[in-house]
């Protein structure tokens, strides 16, 4: 394979059979179960990297079903997003993600810098309750529950909330000697968002300690709100908002 062809084809690994295709990445009927809770501010300060700042110590614990996603397939995800400010503006900083499908793990980490690890999350309706679970191997790490569709939320407000927020990640790619070759804050958008339904209800969240899935390091002190949202959207590619190596 000639040098020019290598450069042309070098999108993702492996060269001759990339783990994920080139985007755009469209999601249909993406289903969110988000429980926002207040946590220990000192615990937050220990994990939120400068120049991001925290105010009200809020964490959103998310369970997300993605039954139809371009190139990534059918999978489920779970993790934590921390409320921060950057350059004086509010944003969500994705702290941890666990999912059950290799292409979005590889693509998420390599393209954007999503902090993705392999695990087994689920999101299902059991009779009158929406239930999200996260297992890391055989160990249960998180359980969230909400009364199923107890009260409808305003769709326009939820669409603005989903599409209008700033989304930040810390992308780290090591050099061959183990030192960081890329270390940067990435800003990515959610595009062409259509919210099809949104509900709330009484909710509960339990998180448990695990050596390799340390979600319980941000303890639940008070549940602030819970939302169940169904939407179509496109995951846009990112821009570099801050480079630690410059």
Image (cartoon, helix red, strand yellow):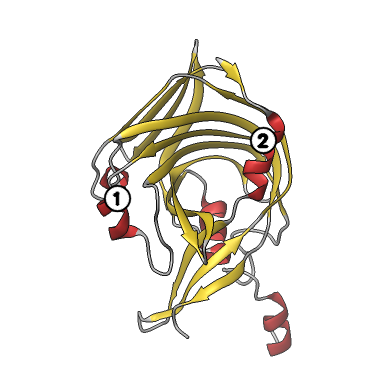
Which image quadrant is residue 239 in?
bottom right
Q: Position of residue 88 (x, y in %)?
A: 52, 63
> Quadrant of residue 135 in the image?
top left
Where is residue 217? Give x, y as percent. 26, 47
- Depth check, front residue: 225 or 184: 225
- Please give the name of the residue rendered at 66% of the width and 62% of the height, measured from the top-left corner: 237
Q: Is 212 rendered above or below residue 37?
A: below
Q: Is residue 135 left or right of residue 210?
A: right
The location of residue 78, given as percent across then percent down, is 45, 41
Classify 10 Å Cα crowding around label 2: few (below 14), some (14-19), many (20 and above). few
Cα distance between the residues tagged 2 and 1 = 28 Å
- Identify the residue position indicated by label 2 in the image: 157
Query: In this rendering, does residue 103 appear at all?
Result: yes
* Rendered position, 220 above or below 127: below
Q: Quadrant of residue 183?
A: bottom left
Q: Which residue is mark 1?
A: 41
Res 196 visible: no
Name the residue rendered at 30%, 45% in the picture. Answer: 218
- Which numbered marker is on residue 3? none
> Dividing the image into 4 quarters, which one contains the N terminus?
bottom right
Residue 213 located left or right of residue 9: left
Element class at badge 2: helix
Q: Which one is nearer the viewer's eye here, 236 or 246?
A: 246
Q: Earlier in the sequence, mark 2 or mark 1?
A: 1
Can you give x and y, in whole percent of width and height, for residue 37 in the image?
38, 37
Instruction: Label 1, secondary structure: give it.
Output: helix
Q: Residues within 10 Å of mark 1 (few under 14, many from 20)?
A: some
Q: How many marks?
A: 2
């Amino acid at each position: 394979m000639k040098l020019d062809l290598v450069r042309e084809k070098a999108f993702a690994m492996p060269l001759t059979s990339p783990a994920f295709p080139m985007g755009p990445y469209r999601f249909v009927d993406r289903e969110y179960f988000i429980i926002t809770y207040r946590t220990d501010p000192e615990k937050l300060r220990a994990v939120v990297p400068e120049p991001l700042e925290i105010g009200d110590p809020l964490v959103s614990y998310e369970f997300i079903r993605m039954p139809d996603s371009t190139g990534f397939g059918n999978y489920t995800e779970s993790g934590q997003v921390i409320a921060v400010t950057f350059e004086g503006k509010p944003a969500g900083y994705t702290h941890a993600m666990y999912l059950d499908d290799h292409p979005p793990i590889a693509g998420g980490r390599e393209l954007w810098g999503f902090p993705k690890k392999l695990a087994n999350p689920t999101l299902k309706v059991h009779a009158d309750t929406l239930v999200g679970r996260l297992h890391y191997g055989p160990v249960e790490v998180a359980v969230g529950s909400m009364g199923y569709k107890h009260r409808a939320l305003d769709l326009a407000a939820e669409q603005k909330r989903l599409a209008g927020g700033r989304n930040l990640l810390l992308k780290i790619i090591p050099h061959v000697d183990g030192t960081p070759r890329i270390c940067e804050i990435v800003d990515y958008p959610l595009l062409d968002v259509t919210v099809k339904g949104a509900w709330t209800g009484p909710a509960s969240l339990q998180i448990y300690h695990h050596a390799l899935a340390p979600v319980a390091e941000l303890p639940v002190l008070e549940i602030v709100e819970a939302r169940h949202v169904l939407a179509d959207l496109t995951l846009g590619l990112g821009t570099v908002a801050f480079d630690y190596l410059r």
